[in-house]
Amino acid sequence: MTYRTGRLVAALLASTIAGQAFAQDVTVVLSEELNTVEPCMATQSNVGRVLLQNISETLTELVPGEGLQPRLATDWEDMGNGTWRFHLREGVSFSDGTAFDAEDVKFSLERNLSDKFVCETGAKYYGGMTLTTNVVDENTIEITSDPAQPILPLLMSTLAVLPSETDPDAFTDAPVGTGPYTFDEYARGQHIKLSARDDYWGEAPEVTSATYVFRSESAVRAAMVAAGEADIAPNIALQDATDKGTDYAYPNSETVYMRLDLSAAPLNDVRVRQALNYAVDKEAFVGTILADGTLLSTGMTPPSTIGYNHDLDPYPFDPDKAKGLLEAAQSDGVDVGAEITVIGRLENFANVVETMEALTSMWQDVGFNVKLQMVEVAEWNKYYSKPFPEDIGPTMVQAMHDNANGDPVFSMFNKYASDGVQSGTADPQLDEMITKATGASGDAREALWEEVFAYVHDDLVADVFLWHMVGMSRVNERLDFTPSIRTNSELQLSQISFK
Amino acid sequence: MQSFLGKRAVASAISLVGLIILVFFLSRLTGDPTDLYLPVDASLESRERFREINGLNDPLLIQFVHYMGDLLRFDFGDSIRRSEPALEAVLRGFGWTLQLAVITMSLVTVSAIVLGSLAAFHVGGIFDRIATFFSLIGASAPDFWVAIVAIVIFSVGLGWLPTSGTGTPWHWVLPVAVLFIRPFGLILQVVRGAMITALHAPYVKTARAKGVRNRPIIFVHALRNALLPVITVIGDQTTAILNGAVVVETIFGFPGIGKLMIDSILQRDFNVILAAIMVTAFAIFLLNLLIDILYAVLDPRIRY
């Protein structure tokens, strides 16, 4: 009996090991349950991590270090007057078996701007422009933007393509795409399951199936990878990243800054804004309450963005200089003792409250009269986005901005143009510079954005420039996968292999 | 009895309507969900379109009339965030929490009554010391701390149990164990106190004088009379879990109604908030009714 039991156990073990050799399943533990699995909501980090390039592909793809690459479009050309012609990949099919063609691209774009629901992709990236399409043939489509967008191909890296048979008037709960995986199951509150397609147009991925589970507690996500229950926890807190063998820090495309209201005294004086920058010991935060690897910033976008000005130096910590600047301003009649309200956003990033309290203390040390208010997101957005509340006096708003799309245009208009929805400045010269850079292409575009960054940082001193943040991920040692800046918005299973 | 049930149903319905009105207006006073739903970079046109589509531009009173009209047709509306009917999300979450509450409170009830009765019988004895120890732990150990420590020890360290989630009976062990501690300590003390009183009652002395053995004295004569306050506390603790074992659900990734409610409040998902409150209110109404009926069963002097 003992012998037979032993054989049974051995057989079961052998089949399990054999099964593992062929079925390469990974489990990803996400920080929250997905509210929706609609591809046009893939701008939400966790929705993007499940769907983007796994289920739903885009015409183009921004690859860190390589720039804009073909995906469903093989190449594209500027036809002038805001029109771009995209040549689509042939022989591609959706996971439901229907063929991919230009009508699907047209449908996906129009659906993104539906009046029956609001898509985040459309709301975030296609505002302020009119996009029209012209299907040339089944593998060629022209997309026209009014006003013209030199970065239209880059914008197309945000458009998840769905089959034209998808319901145009409602969110889908069973997304179909051209990606290497099929969406098999969403057991709400429990898991999502994907499995590899055998008819994918590209190279077959090593990961044959994936399970996504949801745990809002960072310590539990880290524990799941440590216990072998999960393979990747894309977002864990600094204090839970305790294992150098499995925990990775990566630039997560978020930039933290203080948006200043340049219309109100004393913030309308450039010396006061400089003093605010000199008063902050940014390096003291790194490796203490912010993760090691956090970078000091000189601009609104991550350093990997085109046109980022690498020649700019962060304002050094120089409290004496800050005090001197304040004294000079005061002697010219500027009311430097006026109370400045500092608005911080609760839950914005790990240790945000401690960070804001330390910043407040540093400003107080050089003589500023600042008062900190930490508020939840909806309250915070009243201060951050126009129309701003009236009669609130000088205000600094702490914000964290995400730009993983490689071009400053996704940031600079909203943050700095006079009509920008989160802009605290109204500077005609800067407006003109942004307009010129937005309309340029190639090297000229890069140079013009560098000028914009320099003007905002050195001349206008529009913000208190703080940090480019890093994210922490825990990855099971059995995987060959290194998180990157894109892990903040997508997690391509096809890029994961096994050691 | 029927008249009692009818009166209770009417009183509960009136309370429920009052609750709906209160929650409807209070939740909307917290602000517009548009800012939470759309990214901060969303255009002003998108924000306006979102408000229009979700009826948020209508005056509050009109929104309320629409909501009540839909409710009369048992239409609880859709979740803004989750793109599914609000009631569907709530009932799914409630199912998980109900299972958690039933399993936990069954274990708590049986173990607290047995241990509490034995502790009362031998005041100062071994069972009494165990009862006091668990009561202290229950009163002083925070749920979140116990949960994290349990994961570190039993899942990561020893590898005996899954860290979190659902799927197998083993997944229930840690959440139930963590939820168990607090009501167990409380009910244990209530049982002990009630039993000490009951065991000194004249009918127990009579039973002893008649030569009845200890076990029937404790579990038949004294316990039945001591149960009334215990049932009240059991009902109270069950209500607390039904209202949402938020900490346990959050840490163990249990998709219950507590976590759903907190998320909905934070995200201003009004229809889910209202549906969750109505479902839990209805469940608590049924639970209270059950407790009233149990009173009558246990004590023949109580008549409705």
Image (tube, coloured by chain):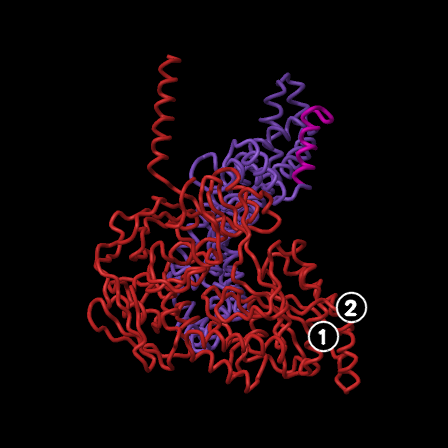
Pick the front one: B21 or B95? B95
What amino acid type is highlighted by mark number 1?
Ala
Say which residue appears at 49% left-offset and 37% top-offset: B162
Q: Is residue A62 above or below residue A259?
A: above
| Residue at image mark 2 | A365
Quadrant housing residue B86: bottom left
- Examine the rendering and report whether any part of residue A404 can be seen: yes
Quadrant housing residue B96: top left
Q: Is residue A113 above or below residue A282?
A: below
Q: Earlier in the sequence, mark 1 or mark 2?
A: 1
Quadrant housing residue A320: bottom right
- Examine the rendering and report whether any part of residue B202 can be seen: no
Q: Is residue A122 above or below residue B239?
A: below
Q: Secondary structure at mark 1?
A: helix
Drawn side of residue A10 relative to residue A407, left or right: left
The hue of chain B in the figure is purple
What amino acid type is highlighted by mark number 2?
Asp
Mainly helix, strand or loop, the magenta region? helix
Drawn side of residue A248 relative to residue A492, left or right: right
| Residue at image mark 1 | A275
Q: Position of residue A434 (x, y in %)?
A: 50, 80
Question: Which chain corresponds to the colour red?
Answer: A
> Is the N terminus of chain A in the top left, top right, bottom left or bottom right quadrant?
top left
Question: Dot 1, crowdedness within 10 Å: few (<14), some or many (≥20)?
Answer: many
- Which chain does tag 1 point to? A
Question: Dot 2, crowdedness within 10 Å: few (<14), some or many (≥20)?
Answer: some
Structural distance between the alpha carbons of marks 1 and 2: 12 Å
> Is the C terminus of chain A in the top left, top right, bottom left or bottom right quadrant?
top left
Pick the front one: A263 or A498? A498
The question of residue B126 being in magenta is answered with yes
Magenta-colored span? B122-139
Q: Is residue A477 above or below residue A48?
A: above
